[in-house]
Image (tube, helix red, strand yellow):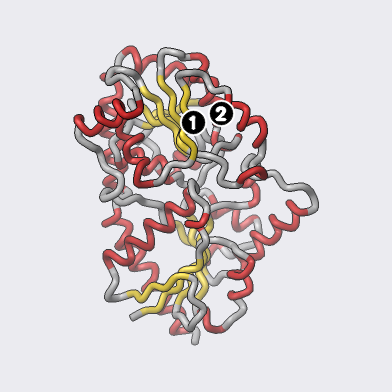
Amino acid sequence: MIKINMFSSADKVAGQGVGSAYKELINLLKDHFSDEFDVKINDYHQSDLSHYHTIDPQFYLSTFSKKRGRKIGYVHFLPETLEGSIKLPEPAKSVFYKYVISFYKRMDQIVVVNPTFIDKLVKHGLDRNKIKYIPNFVSTDNFYEKTAEEKADFRKKLGIPEDKFVVFGDGQVQERKGVDDFYKLAQTNPDIEFIWAGGFSFGKITDGYDRYKDMIDNAPSNMKFTGIVDRNDLVNYYNICNLFLLPSYDELFPMSVLEAFSCGAPVLLRDLELYRAIIDGYYQRAEGFADMNAFINKANQDRSILDNFKKKSQEATNQYSEDNLSKIWYEFYMDQYKIAKRDK
């Protein structure tokens, strides 16, 4: 068996897409390849492959040990993508950003979840030949479309009428996620229910923490901030919404969009270059607030236009299915193992 050691603290902070992607991969390997791969978590014994999901300092130090075997780095963010997420004073910010790139350069192989990151990593000094794109995925065992009765029951639990139009968004409460536009849409459309699931995963160092805390405390009556929701409960929110909206200004390969697709929810997204590279054709584009507002009102008035988007969500789910990605990950780890054996 090939010994693979996963280094990660991604599941220690709730409400992060990195943690969701990590859990999905671990479950995939256990479900599909338990006879081929011996997967350990944060184990410092000898391994053939070491896959780093987070950039903790103790993990960085471990990369200097010969026991790590071939080192694989999972890139979920770059320094520039942290802008609008966390607020650090200088010189701490510059030091941290340099550390991030230094960590990636310690790897023998890099995996990105969005192909648009390849050129950006090369500009940071990484070798293009050592970078591979493997998309995120979600399991349909956890995220799936529920029955009409189950949907009605959850709406009743939340006190939302069955015929009420619901717009749902998910992610950390921060500027980068476009929460300001989501909030403004709720203010502009008092007849529509808006729900945002997510909180302050970075606590008070979240950029704009005080302002967003005030927004949450003074949200309009048709706007609900749920706080961080367990992934096992998120499936219910995706199922009761008429439309999933992620107004982010910057993303990699958002797990929330894949989860929405998997639950059959129509998806509305800000028009970003990175989405065109990975999920073009599966969602409704919006340039900004005006486009989002126009489409939401159009869909509320004629809900039949969302039927086609439900079909697109199913097509996207088939494209990024666990079965498809299991083959890709199997081939990837096998190739990495062969290189590790060759280089010994």
**Mark 2 packing: few (<14 Cα in 10 Å), some, or many (20+)?**
some
Q: Quadrant of the N terminus?
A: bottom left
Q: Residue furthest right?
A: 91
Where is 119 relative to 262, above or below?
A: below
Which secondary structure lies at badge 1? strand
Q: Residue furthest bottom?
A: 344
Which secondary structure lies at badge 2? helix
Precedes in sequence: disc 2 or disc 1 = 2
Nearest the viewer among 88 and 118 is 88
Where is 336 relative to 97, above or below?
A: below
Where's residue 292, x and y in %?
Answer: 47, 22
Q: Residue at x 41, y 53 (%)?
A: 135
Nearest the viewer among 284 and 263 is 263
Where's residue 222, x and y in %?
Answer: 45, 19
Which residue lies under the disc numbered 2? 216
Where is 233 relative to 21, above or below?
A: above
**Mark 1 packing: few (<14 Cα in 10 Å), some, or many (20+)?**
some
Dot 1 amino acid type: Phe
* Mark 2 touches mark 1? (CB < 8 Å): yes
Q: CA distance from mark 2 to mark 1?
A: 6 Å
Q: Residue at x 62, y 78 (%)?
A: 64
The disc label shown at residue 337, or none: none
Nearest the viewer among 96 and 225 is 225
Q: Residue at x 26, y 57 (%)?
A: 323
Where's residue 199, x and y in %?
Answer: 53, 39
Nearest the viewer among 154 and 244 is 154
Which quarter of the picture shows residue 179? Answer: top right
Dot 2 amino acid type: Ile
Where's residue 296, x and y in %?
Answer: 41, 19
Which residue lies under the disc numbered 1? 225
